[in-house]
Amino acid sequence: MIRYSQHHFKYIQCIYVCVFVCVHLTSGNSCCCSFEDYKLTTEWLLNQTSHRPKVAVICGSGLGLLADGAANKQIFRYQDIPNFPVSTVQGHEGCLVFGTIEDTPCVFMQGHFHLYEGYSLCKVTFPVRIFKLMGVETLLVTNASGGICPDFKVGDIMIIKDHINLPGFAGQHPLCGPNDERFGIRFPCMSDAYSKDLRRVALDIGSELGCSDFIREGVYCMVSGPNFETIAEARMLLILGCDSVGMSTVPEVTVAKHCGLRVIGLSLITNKVSLDYSREEKVNHDEVLEIGKMRAEVLQKLVTTLISRCQQQSINTH
Ligand SMILES: *[C@@H]1O[C@H](CO)[C@@H](O)[C@H](O)[C@H]1NC(C)=O
Ligand SMILES: *[C@@H]1O[C@H](CO)[C@@H](O)[C@H](O)[C@H]1NC(C)=O
C-alpha cells in the first residue's frame, strides 16, 4: 500500500488548484466568435453602406460629438448589427457611425464595452476585427483616465506612448485561445503598439493649436475595475511606471496591433488618483466636468486634424 506523506498531499493540492485555475481561465477566455462570425458582420455592413472607412475612432466619454461633425453620416444601432455586442449600461450610446472628416472616410464607435460590464474580451474587441476586415488602416482610441504621474493636471491630454496590460498579466487577455492566423501571428510584438509617427504628428498638431502646455506623453495602465484604485494600488502603479490609469482601451489596442492596424491613443486626464493617506484629494466634480467640457473641444479639434493628417501620412508612406 502506498503511504502518502503530508508533503504529497500539499503537492497534489497544488496541482489541483493549478488545473482548476487554468481550466477556469481558459474557459472564460475561449473566443466567442469564429472567423465566419466576423465575416458575416463585415459583409452585412458592407452590404448596408457604401462607406469604406480608412480610419476607425473609438470615442471616449464626451467625444461622441466628434462623430456629429462628420459629413454624409450613416448610423447603425449596435442592436441592429448581427453579432455586435450591445451595451448593457442604460443611457450608454451604442451607435456605429460612418461618415467623412475632411474627405477621410471614417467609422466611429459611440459607446464601447468594458470588461467590468461582464463582457468577454473577445466581445469587447469584436468591432476592431470588423474594422480590419472592412479595410480600416488606422485605429484612433480616445478615453478618459485618472492621473497617476504627480506632474499631471486635471484636463491634461495624454498621448498614449505605451501601456501596461494588468488584466493580461492575470490571464484576462483578448488573444488567449487558439490563434487565427488570418488575423495575425501567435506571438505579436507589442513594443511598438502606438505608432511613433502618429504620436509625432499629434504632438505637432498640439503645438500648432497652441496647447503644448497641457499635452503630455505617457504610459496608460489598464485595470479591470469597476472599483477605483486603493491608495496602495495607486502607489504600486506609480512605482511600476504608469502615468495614468483607466478601465478600457488596452484590449482593443492589443487586438488592433495583432491584426496590423496602426494605433494612436489619446487620454483625457479627468481626475487625479489619490496617492497619499494624509492628504485626501477631494475631487471637485463640477470642476472636472467643466474642464472636461472645455478640453473636449480641443480634443475634438486635435482628433479631426489627426484624422486628415494620418490619412495623408499613410498615402505618403505607401
Ligand atoms: C450581402 O449581399 C449579397 C448580394 O446581395 C447577398 O448574397 C448576401 O447574402 C448579403 N450578405 C449579408 C450578410 O447580408
Ligand atoms: C473611459 O474611461 C472612463 C474611466 O476609465 C470610463 O468611466 C468611461 O466609461 C470610458 N468611456 C467610455 C466611452 O466608455
Image (tube, rainbow, N blue to C red):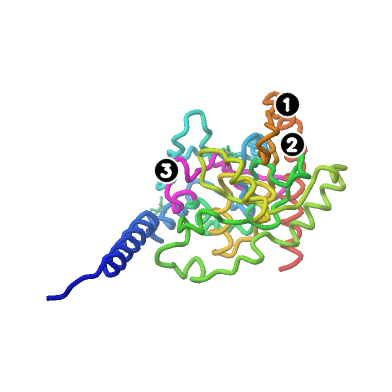
Quadrant into which the C terminus falls: bottom right
- CA–CA distance in space, label 2 to label 3: 29 Å
* Relative to 222, residue 187 above or below: below
State which image quarter holds ligand 2. Answer: top right
Is residue 70 visible to us here? Answer: no
Q: Amino acid at mark 1?
A: Glu
Range of magenta residues: 96-124
Is 108 in the magenta? yes
Q: Name the residue beneath numbered marker 3.
A: 118
Q: Are marks 2 and 1 in contact (CB under 8 Å)?
A: yes
In-front residue for pair 190/274: 274
Q: Would you name the residue on which mark 2 appears? A: 154
- Check whether the beta carbons of the residues at disc 2 and disc 3 lie within 8 A of each other: no
Residue 210 quadrant: top right
* Rendered location of residue 124, percent (x, y): 48, 49
Task: Tell me what residue is drawn at x 67 percent, y 31 percent.
Answer: 280
Which amino acid lies under the numbered mark 3 shown in the image of this protein?
Answer: Gly
**Badge 3 local density, few (<14 within 10 Å), some, or many (20+)?**
few
**Which of the two discs, 3 and 1, labels the residue nearer the N terminus?**
3
Inter-mark Cα distance, 2 to 1:
9 Å
Which residue occupies 70% across, 26% down?
284
User: Looking at this rendering, what residue extends furthest in the left direction?
Assistant: 1
Q: Considering the image in quadrants, where does the N terminus appear?
A: bottom left
Is residue 121 located in the magenta-colored stretch of the structure? yes
Mark 3 lies on a secondary structure that is: loop
Residue depicted at 78% across the width and 49% down the height: 216
- The residue lying toward the viewer, choosing from 207 and 149, is 149
